């Protein structure tokens, strides 16, 4: 179980005003990522004050009976896009509706994305997002920042955001060419800078160049419907970019986080790279864990378009179960939603061209129940692993732990009383999102929150939603998260130790003086009468006895002369005009 030592959360008394001053939860089983415990919980001023069996209950305190239920840390969704301006419209779940839906499903904190336009200041975009969110959020939230273009100014702004504004993660797009995508050499420099700042580099991993060409080819073939979206962004395009991002990040030993892992192939790349020792984290989302890309071939355009997101769902119906298996065994590390909702009317922008369908689906309200159903209820993971993949690992990766992601003395009182046996059937008719569709429509899930407590306030009370607009706060995050960066120390030391030049005594006769070099050059240019040689005649430097030509014949295969005379001071020099192996257009 988590340590019961007091934790300074940084939340002032004024910030917790409006929460219920005192709350007592009794009779439940506390589930943390590292174990379970039968104990009661005392909450005061939004903070967990005491955990135990014989707690003295203050008079007048509200008591919640959690008998037969699980008491778990509130969910943390590290990937949302609320009221995002995108593809000529804006996602309909704003920061009020989105966080209200999150709470209804048992999530008590989100991390959204600031996405500047090309040439837009990162700091200006950050201020814009804070202006949208601060007065609306019902639960605590934080922000990542996307780097959509690269310059010395952006580099400086990244440093300012880390040092002064509480950021420790930056996202780069390898797709959406000419809109959001950055190129490989820019990625390399951004990764290098993230490492210096102690930030985590995140990537949307798809090959944007291939997608741009595929999209034109598929559309030209007469395919205009949602199936064209998947056909233009096949699985290997995601896997290739995932591998490339891992390779680029490993060159500078930068920790990497791959958002919305949608395919077996991409997941396998992450699992393999982790086995090799790379510090990389994989984030499947509720959609990729619970539904599949066969929906793109549905006869109903509305149904098919509702499932369009990037990377797309995969047509292989065994993909969700495969990803859940990897999640259960920590080959993938945590879950999110990529919640970015659009109505049917908005999706119709692409009714004649799949390239214009706004990309995005729901998930914020349903993630916890969907993961419980597909993971715990189906026997693939236990309750502690469920807590890890829905809350604790996100808190550790983004340096929120132990303020968030754990039930421990001193932690924020973000708590869910979870009924593992109760069921609910998901439907757009009953969900709390602003969109008129739900990709999990008709799915019956075990696992339902009876109570959801955000910073000490009961926001779901016996199943009734009582979220309060503006109650949530922005949570800053420090760089160099121990969970991420502690594992890099040994790798840094090994890389540094390997960067030692070879000490050599000289050039072993392969280089000659400028005078000799000049004479050889003159001799090889003419044949003695001022005329240039033909058909290679005289192209080899000689000392009058054809020794140079003989040495060339005794080659080690790389073009460098070998043999008994190769180390002689009298050996003629062969000038190499290309690196070993011939001409190279890249690094060698």
Image: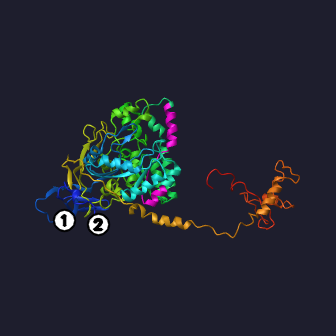
Judge whether residue 396 is colored magenta. Answer: no
Residue 430 visible = yes
Q: Does the magenta stretch include residue 199?
A: yes
Please say whether residue 168 is visible from this viewpoint: no
Hey, which quadrant is residue 570 in on the image?
bottom right
Q: Can you say whether 308 is above or below 479 in the image?
A: above
- Write down the residue under mark 1: 53
Q: Residue furthest left?
A: 59
Q: Position of residue 63 (x, y in %)?
A: 15, 57
Read off the magenta span: 191-219
Q: What element does badge 2 sit on?
A: loop
Q: Mark 2 points at which residue?
A: 3
x and y percentages locating residue 583 in the rendered image = 68, 51
Graded by Cα atoms within 10 Å as few (under 14), some (14 to 19) or many (20 or more), the crowding at tag 1 reads few
Q: Could you tell me which residue is drawn at 52 percent across and 34 percent down?
A: 217
Residue located at (41% from left, 34% from top) = 297
The image quarter in which residue 290 lies: top left
| Cα–Cα gap, marks 1 and 2 | 16 Å
């Amino acid at each position: 179980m988590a340590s019961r030592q007091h934790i300074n959360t940084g939340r002032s008394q004024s910030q917790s005003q409006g929460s219920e001053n005192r709350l007592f939860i009794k009779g439940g089983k506390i589930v943390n990522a590292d174990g379970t415990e039968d104990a009661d919980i005392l909450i005061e001023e939004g903070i967990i004050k005491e955990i135990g069996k014989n707690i003295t209950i203050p008079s007048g305190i509200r008591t919640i009976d959690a008998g037969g239920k699980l008491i778990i840390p509130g969910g943390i969704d590290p990937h949302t896009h609320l009221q995002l301006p995108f593809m000529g419209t804006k996602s309909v779940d704003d920061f009020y509706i989105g966080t209200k839906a999150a709470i209804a499903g048992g999530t008590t904190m989100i991390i959204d994305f600031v996405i500047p336009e090309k040439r837009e200041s990162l700091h200006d975009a950050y201020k814009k997002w804070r202006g949208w969110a601060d007065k609306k959020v019902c639960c605590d939230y934080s922000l990542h920042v996307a780097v959509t273009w690269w310059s010395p100014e952006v580099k400086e702004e990244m440093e300012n955001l880390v040092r002064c504004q509480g950021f420790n993660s930056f996202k780069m797009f390898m797709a959406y060419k000419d809109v959001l995508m950055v190129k490989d050499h820019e990625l390399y420099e951004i990764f290098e800078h993230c490492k210096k700042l102690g930030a985590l580099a995140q990537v949307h991993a798809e090959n944007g160049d291939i997608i741009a060409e595929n999209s034109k080819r598929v559309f030209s073939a007469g395919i205009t419907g949602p199936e064209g979206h998947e056909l233009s962004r096949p699985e290997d395009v995601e896997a290739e970019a995932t591998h490339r991002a891992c390779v680029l990040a490993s060159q500078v030993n930068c920790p990497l986080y791959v958002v919305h892992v949608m395919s077996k192939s991409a997941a396998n790349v992450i699992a393999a790279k982790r086995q090799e020792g790379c510090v990389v984290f994989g984030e499947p989302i509720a959609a990729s864990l619970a539904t599949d890309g066969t929906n793109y071939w549905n006869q109903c355009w509305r149904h098919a378009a509702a499932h369009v997101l990037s990377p797309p769902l995969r047509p292989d119906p065994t993909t969700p179960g495969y990803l859940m298996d990897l999640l259960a065994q920590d080959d993938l590390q945590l879950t999110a939603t990529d919640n970015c909702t659009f109505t049917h009317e908005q999706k119709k922008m692409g009714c004649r061209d799949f390239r214009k369908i706004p990309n995005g689906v729901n998930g914020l309200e349903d993630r916890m129940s969907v993961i419980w159903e597909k993971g715990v209820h189906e026997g693939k993971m236990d309750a502690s692993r469920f807590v890890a993949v829905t809350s604790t690992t996100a808190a550790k990766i983004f340096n929120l732990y132990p303020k968030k992601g754990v039930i421990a003395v001193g932690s924020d009182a973000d708590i869910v009383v979870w009924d593992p046996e109760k069921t609910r059937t998901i439907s757009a008719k009953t969900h709390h999102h602003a969109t008129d569709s739900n990709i999990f429509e008709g799915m019956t899930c075990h696992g339902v929150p009876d109570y959801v407590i955000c910073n000490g306030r009961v926001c779901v009370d016996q199943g009734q939603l009582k979220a309060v607009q503006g109650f949530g706060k922005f949570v800053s995050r420090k760089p160099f998260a121990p969970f991420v960066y502690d594992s890099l120390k040994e790798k840094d030391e090994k890389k540094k130790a390997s960067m030692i030049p070879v000490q050599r005594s000289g050039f072993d006769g392969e280089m000659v003086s400028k005078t000799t070099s000049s004479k050889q050059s003159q001799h090889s240019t003419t044949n003695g009468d001022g005329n240039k040689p033909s058909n290679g005649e005289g192209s080899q430097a000689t000392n009058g006895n054809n020794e140079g030509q003989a040495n060339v014949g005794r080659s080690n295969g790389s073009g460098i002369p070998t043999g008994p005379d190769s180390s002689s001071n009298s050996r003629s020099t062969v000038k190499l005009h290309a690196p070993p192996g011939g001409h190279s257009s890249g690094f060698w």
